[in-house]
Image: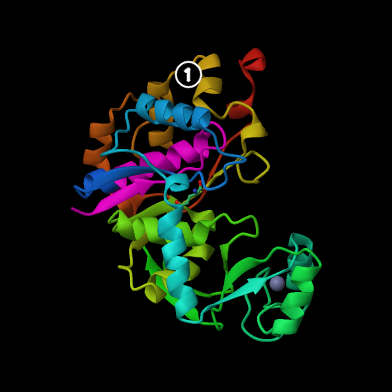
Amino acid sequence: MPAGRFAPSPTGALHLGNLRTALLAWLFARSAGSRFLLRMEDLDQVTASRAHEADQQRDLAALGLDWDGEVVRQSERFDRYEAAIRRLDQLGLTYPCYCSRREVREAAAAPHDGPVPDGAYPGTCRDLSARERRAREAAGRRPALRLRAEGVSVAFTDRLHGRAEGVVDDVVLRRNDGVPAYNLAVVVDDAAQGVAEVVRADDLLTSTPRQLHLARLLDLALPSHAHVPLVLEPSGARLAKRDGAVTLADRRRRGQDAAAVRSWLAASLGLAEPGEPVTPQNLVARFDPARLPREPWRLTADDLAPAETAP
Ligand code: GLU
Ligand code: ZN
């Protein structure tokens, strides 16, 4: 049976944007009769924690979202990511990159020729000689590993955005601290878990060409995509945890329980009247991807005022 999934990074409590994406991912899967999987993208063990993981699962359950099978943790699957990296290596499609973050930023900002997307890594280390590599190693630089993408362009059709296309840059496969990179792990896992449709926030739309390219190189089944609108703070910036009353715990302090948050999210998606109580099952019956809003949901200052000053 095909699957959908929600794949948060357990680096803090889920905020309204994450919760809305989770609700949508669940609705896409359940309305299609698919399994729904929960995957913890905890590759970075410095920022991820089991405590956040438990909080996130508790909050999803409080919204009435359920999932099938065991929760998968990326931190326990490094062998799979390394196997994929070996395969790309054998295809001659990897190279070590010695650039620091700053160097990548500066190089990406400089004008360059060729089909390189804005802000993308321009290939500084792509053609280093063995000697140049040795010099960098000798200077104590630990390399990241990058994909030789060769400027390929990948097109796909997104359920909400329609046809999209992007040039693939030389994406990082393994960071210079040895941790496999998000773009690789997500591709390996979605295929291994039988994910047929990837539903996630539309800030990741531009990562999709890279991920499809990696999946093709690795001979994996390609999922379809639905990139859903973001939730924005009143200024129009992407919602962040520091924005105030954005987690279920914050909302509860304002007197809004999980069921009320579910209604609020549903209303924001055109699936309920404002204030109407809804169950997840009601929402499945009403859900029609073609009628989802395509615009971000912008919160008001009043929505985000902390409990003490809330009206
Ligand atoms: N872990 C990513 C995030 O929390 C989502 C990745 C994905 O859905 O592909 O933003
Ligand atoms: Zn480099």
The front one of 263 and 97 is 97
In the rendered structure, the answer to whether residue 163 lies left or right of residue 221 reads right
Ligand 2 shows up in which quadrant of the image? bottom right
Q: Is residue 17 visible?
A: yes
The front one of 240 and 92 is 92
Up-down relation of residue 248 to residue 214 (above or below): above
The amino acid on which the numbered mark 1 sits, given as a three-letter code, is Gln
Kindly identify which residue carries mark 1: 256
Which image quadrant for residue 190?
bottom left
The spot of residue 31 in percent (x, y) is 23, 46
Does 25 lie within the magenta span? yes
Quadrant the C terminus occupies = top right
Q: Is mark 1 within 8 Å of ligand 1?
A: no
In the rendered structure, the answer to whether residue 234 lies left or right of residue 154 reads right
Which image quadrant for residue 189?
bottom left
Q: Is residue 186 visible?
A: no
Up-down relation of residue 188 to residue 9 (above or below): below
Local packing at callout 1 (Cα closer than 10 Å; few below 14, some 14-19, many 20+) is: some
| Color encoding of the figure | rainbow
The spot of residue 89 in percent (x, y) is 49, 75
The front one of 131 and 192 is 131
In the rendered structure, the answer to whether residue 145 lies left or right of residue 226 reads right
Callout 1 secondary element: loop
Which image quadrant for residue 113?
bottom right
The spot of residue 114 in percent (x, y) is 65, 86
* Residue drawn at (32%, 44%) of the image: 37
* Residue drawn at (45%, 59%) of the image: 81
Up-down relation of residue 297 to residue 172 (above or below): above
Does 166 lie within the magenta span? no
Magenta-colored span: 1-28
The spot of residue 237 in percent (x, y) is 65, 46
